[in-house]
Image (tube, rainbow, N blue to C red):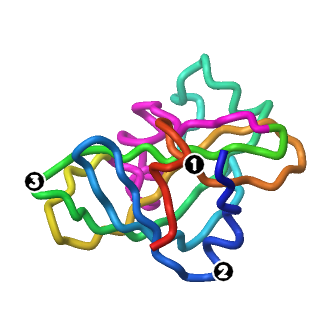
């Protein structure tokens, strides 16, 4: 599996290409940080099946441009750790759509128009342990590559 270290991708400022069937994006990674649970208003509204208090939430900030010919929805950037465990972005309606936290952090669903630039954040739940994180997609390692 091709490794793109998160910190290296952010520090370089490089643009990457994301491909998934007919979707094509240019994406740049801007920031990566641990979320303090106090930032989330009404945390008791987060789905009970997400063990947020046992792990840590990470926020990945991006800038992206839809290079597809049509309007399109989600892209699927995933993280994997030193042990090659994959973590997909969280799909929790309260945390990513219905909270003030979601609004402040650009987590809400957007439909991307072609040729427009968007700032978008993704949230991940990972184990509370030290690890380097790497970027990948939910599809295969060739779906994300340097331009």
Which quarter of the rendered picture does the N terminus lie within? top right
Whether 10 is drawn above or below 34: the answer is below
The numbered disc on residue 70 is 3
7 left or right, relative to 21: right
Point 73% across, 53% down: residue: 133
Residue toward you, 2 or 37? 2
- Residue farthest toward the top in the current orientation of the protein: 49
Residue drawn at x 45%, y 49% as measured from the top left: 143
> Is disc 2 placed on a helix, strand or loop?
helix
Circle 2 Cα neighbour tier, 10 Å, few/some/many (<14 / 14–19 / ≥20): few
The residue labelled by disc 1 is 136
In this picture, residue 12 sits left or right of residue 73: right
Q: Earlier in the sequence, mark 3 or mark 2?
A: 2
* Residue reaching furthest to the left: 70
Sequence-wise first label, 1 or 3: 3
Whether 66 is among the magenta residues is no
105 in relation to 63, above or below: above
Q: Is residue 107 magenta?
A: yes
Image position, residue 43 (x, y; %): 59, 36
Q: Identify the residue shown where x is 75% and y is 33%.
A: 53
Identify the element where label 3 is drawn: loop
Q: Which mark is residue 11?
A: 2
Foreground residue among 97 and 83: 83
Which contiguous range is marked in magenta? 84-108
SS at badge 1: strand
Quarter of the image holding residue 4? bottom right
Measure the alpha-carbon separation of dots 3 and 2: 31 Å
C-alpha separation, residue under disc 1 versus residue under disc 3? 24 Å
Q: Are marks 1 and 3 in contact (CB under 8 Å)?
A: no
């Amino acid at each position: 599996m091709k490794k793109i270290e998160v910190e290296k991708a952010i520090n370089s400022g490089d643009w990457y290409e994301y491909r998934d069937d007919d979707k094509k994006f240019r994406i740049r990674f801007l920031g990566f940080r641990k979320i303090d649970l106090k930032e989330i208003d009404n945390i008791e509204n987060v789905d009970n099946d997400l063990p947020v208090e046992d792990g840590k939430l990470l926020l990945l900030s991006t800038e992206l441009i839809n290079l597809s010919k049509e309007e399109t929805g989600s892209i699927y950037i995933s993280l994997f750790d030193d042990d090659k465990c994959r973590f997909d972005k969280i799909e929790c309606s309260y945390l990513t759509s219905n909270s003030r936290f979601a609004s402040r952090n650009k987590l809400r669903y957007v439909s991307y128009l072609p040729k427009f630039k968007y700032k978008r954040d993704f949230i991940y739940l990972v184990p509370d342990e030290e690890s380097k994180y790497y970027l990948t997609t939910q599809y295969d390692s060739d779906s994300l590559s340097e331009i």
